[in-house]
């Protein structure tokens, strides 16, 4: 009996806190000109408490919760009818959600209810940024995102989940999953660039652009440096920042693809990440006097279906090359694939290294070495881009930072 009373009291308190959280956010969001609204910091706790009690008595009174939801919905509709014209229905929908969250606590799903409440409060708080993001995204980009959703939610589950082809190196479901994962990372970076827009500085441009493609940032900034050599130092900082983000992406992707491989590389890539950020900070300090506007990034749309198909084909080719090279040449073959594949796409090498490691073909150190070689060759490629496309003024600032990162990468290969 005492345990039951304790559970009831804990649930009641949890429902109350959830209501206070939602009510506090809605009260804060209410404009000063609105003396009264549909619900605020006092009403929302009442909604969650009512939902909790309706769930508790659902056994003897099964219609209590449906009746409560209908009653709150009717109040919301009535307020929409008699309330000010042109206002949204966000608070009314949040009130219905509050009732359901209180009921979820009453049914014993308190953790789910609390997590949902936090997410809901976050969405409510981010009203202005989300509206700016929606206005920043074009219709073509929305269409591309919807196509990406079709690929991720409909096409991916239909792909066969078995090893196919020579050496049984290619698993269509695994390749599709990697395409969705990496394209999602690029999509986040792309939307952040679109959201923050102009004027946030070269480092932010490099940071956000590096989420989409550090090579694209290097190409874009190098072209700008060719046009305006006086911007070489801040542009170099942006390139180094974008290249540093590559290590953070690698940590995330490898931990998802192959946790043992990701944990093995975590201290190495983490060290490179810290050093890269420090080098970027030094470049930014030296360029702090520059007042020139930030150059626009030309990243393209990372969720176009054509891009996804090419990415899948690239993954398949690199996977096959890695499996054949490893079978015929051993670890040296996989490392060769890493060095060459990194010139094209480091993520594809991550997929290949994780795949052959999970198949038991190589051990973790060999797969880690292939990925580190890919990052090294990618640095060399972008260093060449900075010289050829950007000119010597840009390369003079980029190369020392890349040389430090390259030296540390080589050292990590032998640790």
Image (cartoon, grey):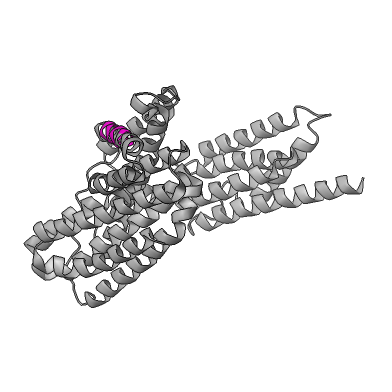
Q: Nearer the viewer, residue 160 or 137?
A: 160
Q: How many marks?
A: 0
Magenta run includes residue 248: no
Residue 75: percent from left, percent from top: 61, 37
- Main SS of the magenta part reads helix
Please report the residue visible at 60 percent of the width from the left and 47 percent of the height from the top: 115
Residue 279 appears anywhere in the view: yes
| Residue lying at 20% horizontally and 62% vertically, measured from the top left | 294
Q: Residue at x 60, y 40 (%)?
A: 97
Q: Is residue 132 visible?
A: no
Report the quarter where the C terminus lies. bottom left
x, y percentage for residue 371?
Answer: 35, 50
Residue 396 as seen in the image, left or right of residue 348: left
The residue lying at 31 percent from left, 55 percent from top is 208
Which quadrant does the N terminus fall into? top right
Reply above or below: 30 against 69: below
The quadrant where residue 315 appears: top left
Q: Position of residue 207 (x, y in %)?
A: 31, 59
Residue 326 image point, x, y percent: 35, 39
Compared with 244, 300 (above or below) is above
Q: Residue 342 vs residue 353: left or right?
A: left
229 lies above or below 245: below
Is 216 on the left or on the right of 109, as rendered? left
Front-lying residue, 266 or 165:
165
Q: Quadrant of residue 157?
A: top left
Magenta residues, as a range?
Answer: 309-320
**Residue most extreme to the right:** 1
């Amino acid at each position: 009996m005492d345990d039951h009373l304790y559970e009831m009291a804990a649930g009641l308190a949890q429902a109350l806190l959830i209501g206070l959280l939602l009510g506090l956010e809605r009260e804060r969001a209410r404009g000063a000109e609105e003396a009264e609204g549909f619900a605020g910091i006092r009403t929302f706790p009442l909604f969650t408490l009512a939902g909790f009690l309706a769930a508790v008595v659902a056994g003897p009174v099964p219609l209590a919760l449906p009746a409560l939801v209908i009653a709150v919905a009717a109040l919301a509709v009535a307020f929409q009818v008699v309330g000010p014209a042109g206002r949204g229905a966000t608070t009314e929908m949040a009130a219905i959600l509050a009732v359901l969250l209180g009921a979820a606590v009453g049914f014993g799903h308190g953790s789910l209810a609390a997590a949902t409440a936090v997410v809901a409060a976050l969405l409510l708080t981010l009203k202005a940024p989300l509206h700016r993001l929606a206005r920043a995204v074009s219709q073509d980009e929305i269409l591309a995102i919807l196509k990406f959703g079709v690929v991720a939610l409909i096409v991916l589950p239909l792909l066969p989940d078995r090893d196919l082809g020579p050496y049984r190196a290619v698993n269509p479901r695994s390749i599709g999953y990697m395409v969705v994962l990496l394209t999602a990372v690029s999509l986040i970076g792309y939307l952040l660039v679109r959201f923050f827009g102009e004027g946030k500085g070269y480092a932010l441009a490099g940071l956000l652009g590096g989420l989409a493609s550090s090579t694209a940032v290097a190409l874009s900034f190098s072209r700008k440096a060719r046009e305006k050599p006086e911007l070489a130092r801040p542009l170099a900082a942006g390139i180094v920042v974008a290249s540093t983000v590559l290590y953070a992406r690698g940590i995330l992707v490898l931990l998802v693809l192959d946790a043992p491989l990701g944990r093995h590389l975590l201290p190495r890539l983490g060290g490179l990440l810290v050093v890269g950020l420090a080098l970027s900070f030094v470049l930014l300090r030296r360029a702090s006097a520059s007042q020139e506007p930030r150059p626009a990034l030309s990243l393209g749309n990372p969720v176009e279906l054509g891009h996804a198909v090419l990415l899948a084909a690239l993954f398949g080719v690199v996977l096959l090359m890695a499996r054949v090279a490893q079978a015929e040449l051993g670890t040296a073959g996989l490392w060769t694939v890493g060095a060459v594949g990194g010139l094209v796409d480091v993520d594809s090498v991550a997929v290949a290294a994780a795949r052959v490691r999970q198949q038991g073909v190589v051990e973790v150190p060999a797969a880690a070495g292939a990925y580190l070689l890919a990052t090294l060759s990618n640095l060399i490629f972008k260093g060449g881009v900075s010289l050829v496309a950007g000119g010597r003024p840009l390369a003079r600032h980029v190369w020392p930072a890349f040389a430090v990162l390259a030296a540390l990468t080589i050292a990590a290969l032998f640790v």
